[in-house]
Image (cartoon, grey):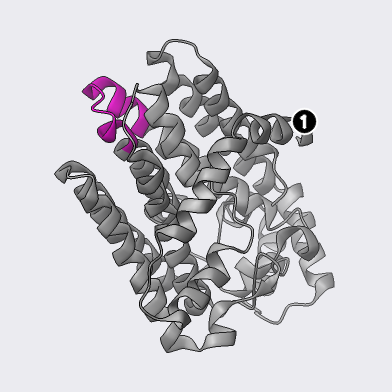
Amino acid sequence: MNDLKTRILGLVADDLVAIEAALAENLNPHLDLVREVAGHILFSGGKRLRPLLLLLVTRMCGYRGEDDTPFSISFEYLHAATLLHDDLIDGAELRRGRPVAHSIYGNATTVLVGDFLLARALSLAARTGKIEIIEVVAGITENMSQGEIHQLSRKGDITLTEEEYREVIHRKTAVLFEGTCRAAAYLADAPESQVEAMAAYGVNLGLAFQMADDLIDYTSDTAVLGKKAGADLREGKLTLPVIAALAAAPEHARRRMQAIILNPDFSPDDFEVLKTDLNHHGGLAYTRQCAEEHVRRAKAALEVFAPSSTTDILRDIADYTLSRKA
């Protein structure tokens, strides 16, 4: 995994430098407080995966303009906005190993800065002059909001089905990856076949990414995660490892797991028991199998493009989705 990550970072080093500069240059708030709160989440060590995807896809689709880097950061602003809002809704304490923004700046300020970042993303989309790109960015914000509402409405509900889980992660996570890749192809004036191929790559990458995240919550500790282990469960989020294990477990094991899941103050020992059950009853293995299938589909979508160093990087990114530890 470290070799794969090192290879990817080496190949995209210049892109990441350009993205980092553009994030700071294009923020442009009127108030220093807005810059401070936005910076708390934007410059706390994110992977920059979404803007990087846009640059790679535009390159693969033959883009030769100068709008790719400034536009790419709109997707990082969107991502950061959702993290600010989600942490507040979830009552989270840590994000990337640091106190969450609302614990420092207050709920109202944090919500409004999230709103500012959403609007900033739309402003950058408008600069491209392409209505289809504006529609993609607007559609992302609509879907992500509805995904969060759906998840909130089923908080702590042990009857959540795999179908509902998939709908939630599609709206909350995968549409941002899909929209990033689709918008990149639109920016490059790519033919429809390439637009749809990149959308397929993005949505499957996003689904695999979220499923891998849901696995990591049960396989890594706080130091690696940057948040408390078991945080999703404490926040009432039933993810695929839990849903699948509950469906497969016999009655006595299911009752044991349900007792832990329904207790937000479960102990570290309880959490270890739950992780053992998730492993024993196939929840972890099934989730990984599903994530692997989405990685396979993402890589298959790249086959409409001629082999190149960029397609190789996109394949590596798909593989890295399953290999990462945080």
Percent from the top left, x then y, of residue 88?
Answer: 50, 79
Quarter occupied by residue 262: bottom right
Q: Nearer the viewer, residue 84 or 58?
A: 58
Q: Is residue 223 left or right of residue 243?
A: right
Using the image, determine if residue 68 lies above or below residue 194. below
Residue 183: x %, y % from top left = 30, 39
Name the quadrant containing residue 9.
top right
- The residue positioned farthest toward the top in the image shown: 306
Is residue 216 shown to the viewer in this render?
Answer: yes
Q: Residue at x 75, y 56 (%)?
A: 277
| Residue at figure coordinates x 47%, y 74% from the top left | 35
| Residue 165 shows in the view | no
221 or 244: nearer the viewer: 221
Q: Position of residue 205 (x, y in %)?
A: 49, 37
- In magenta, the rendered stretch is 184-199
**Residue position for label 1:** 3
**Front residue of 104 and 289:** 104
In the rendered structure, which amino acid carries the disc numbered 1?
Asp
Question: What percent of the width, then of the height, locates residue 138?
Answer: 24, 56
Vertical arrangement, residue 217 with respect to residue 91, above or below? above
Residue drawn where x is 29% and y is 54% of the image: 124
* Magenta portion: prevailing SS class: helix
Q: What residue is at 52 percent from the left and 28 percent from the top?
A: 314
Q: Is residue 27 left or right of residue 124?
A: right
The stretch drawn in magenta includes residue 13: no
Residue 186 painted magenta = yes
Describe the element under mark 1 as helix, strand or loop: helix
